[in-house]
């Protein structure tokens, strides 16, 4: 009898220790992840790294809550549940949960279809012509009114002269007579940058220069009906990691950490520049492009202040991603809109012409 009681006490003690350890780990991960959008990565980078994997952390937290409930540690369950619910407005931008199909729109003067698409320089040199034609045909088929394109460009020494700088711009003229193009990366081999295509006239064209070889933002104005909007196209700093570099850095984790932290810090600075443009704008804004960052990030938080995420507002529930390369499936492309602009619908279209999927959203523009 004494041995049995001792054994039961031992199991009980182990259960308490296990519950405490798992609860503590889960709570620390959850709190640090919640801090990700509010913590500048140059000060503390750990929350930024956890923000990238917010969905696995959320799944882990729910599993811990279920486990703690099963062993009747209800106080721990309640604490974790409270933090999970408090952070709901943050993580629901990564794991979409929409309780209503679309916004209730009583009046809409003009419906405008918007696309953002990183075209990856139309793939490689060898596949350029085929990929360019596929993407052009895809855009024409989808027929958006405004297209934000990143990594738009050409190879200077391409054997096919029909795909030089002037030619690739002209191919879009039949449907999109207005454009705002800025080539940021200009080398002897290639040029690429960002482009806005529009069915409506574009005016007041400007660029935002960053201390970066490849990345830039531009903004311009468009008038639709009686409403003028500011369009801000963005391609923010990337980690610049090829598959070979990832494999190399996995062996040198410290080098990988500092490389990623450097990119996060650069994006934070770029995000602040974009936020200034938004704040100074006399018109409602549409901010789109490849942010190279997830919704649970500092840079996304800085840019999205006072704006609605069109995908979050108009898409079906579930996890979504726009970047797809190997096992890396992350939502790093975004369309953010002024709160006066209503979102009718949004979707990610899975076409394999690039390492990014395009986002398409339909907006309601009111003349008021």
Image (cartoon, rainbow, N blue to C red):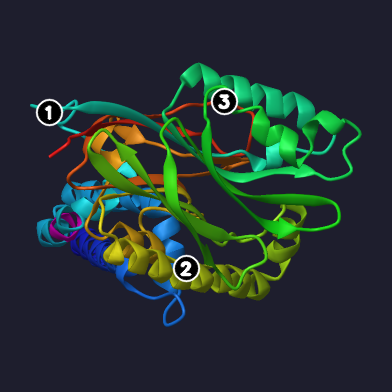
SS assignment at label 2: helix
Answer whether residue 7 is magenta in the image.
no
Q: Residue 270 carries which label?
A: 2
Q: Please identify, in this view, whether the residue under mark 3 or under mark 2 is nearer the observer.
A: 2
Depth order, front residue of 73/97: 97
- Distance from Cα at disc 2 to Cα at disc 1: 34 Å
**Where is mark 3, residue-wise?**
351
Q: Looking at the rendering, which quadrant does residue 304 occupy?
A: bottom left
Residue lying farthest to the bottom in this orientation: 43
- Residue drawn at x 17%, y 45% is 340
- Distance from Cα at disc 1 to Cα at disc 3: 30 Å
Q: Which mark is residue 231?
A: none
Q: Residue 105 carries which label?
A: 1
The magenta segment: 80-84
SS assignment at label 1: loop
266 with respect to 202 (left or right): right
In the rendered image, the quadrant that contains the N terminus is bottom left
Confirm or deny contact between disc 2 and disc 1 (CB under 8 A).
no
Magenta segment, principal secondary structure?
helix
């Amino acid at each position: 009898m004494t041995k049995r009681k001792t054994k039961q006490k031992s199991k009980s003690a182990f259960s308490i220790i296990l519950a405490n350890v798992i609860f503590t780990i889960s709570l620390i991960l959850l709190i640090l992840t919640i801090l990700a959008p509010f913590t500048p990565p140059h000060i503390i980078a750990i929350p930024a790294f956890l923000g990238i994997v917010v969905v696995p952390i959320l799944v882990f937290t729910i599993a811990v809550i279920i486990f703690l409930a099963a062993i009747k540690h209800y106080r721990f369950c309640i604490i974790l549940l409270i933090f999970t619910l408090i952070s709901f407005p943050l993580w629901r931008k990564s794991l979409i949960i929409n309780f209503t199909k679309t916004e209730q729109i009583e009046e809409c003067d003009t419906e405008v279809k918007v696309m953002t698409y990183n075209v990856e320089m139309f793939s490689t040199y060898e596949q350029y012509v085929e990929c360019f034609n596929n993407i052009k045909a895809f855009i024409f088929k989808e027929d958006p009114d405004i297209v934000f394109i990143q990594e738009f460009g050409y190879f200077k020494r391409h054997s096919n002269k029909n795909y030089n700088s002037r030619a690739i711009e002209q191919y879009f003229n039949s449907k999109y007579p207005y454009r705002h193009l800025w080539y940021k990366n200009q080398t002897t081999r290639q040029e690429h940058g960002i482009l806005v295509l529009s069915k409506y006239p574009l005016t007041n064209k400007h660029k935002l220069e960053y201390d970066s070889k490849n990345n830039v933002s531009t903004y311009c104005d468009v008038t639709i009906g009686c409403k003028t909007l500011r369009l801000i196209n963005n391609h923010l700093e990337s980690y610049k990691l090829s598959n070979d570099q990832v494999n190399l850095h996995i062996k040198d984790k410290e080098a990988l950490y500092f490389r990623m932290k450097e990119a996060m810090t650069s994006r934070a600075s770029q995000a602040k520049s974009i936020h200034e443009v938004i704040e100074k704008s006399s018109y409602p804004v549409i901010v789109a492009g490849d942010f190279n960052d997830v919704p649970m990030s500092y840079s996304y938080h800085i840019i999205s202040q006072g704006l609605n995420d069109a995908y979050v507002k108009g898409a079906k529930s579930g996890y979504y991603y726009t970047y797809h390369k190997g096992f890396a499936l992350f939502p790093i492309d975004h369309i953010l809109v002024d709160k006066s602009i209503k979102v009718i619908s949004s979707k990610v279209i899975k076409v394999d012409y690039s390492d990014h999927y395009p986002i398409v959203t339909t907006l309601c523009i009111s003349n008021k």
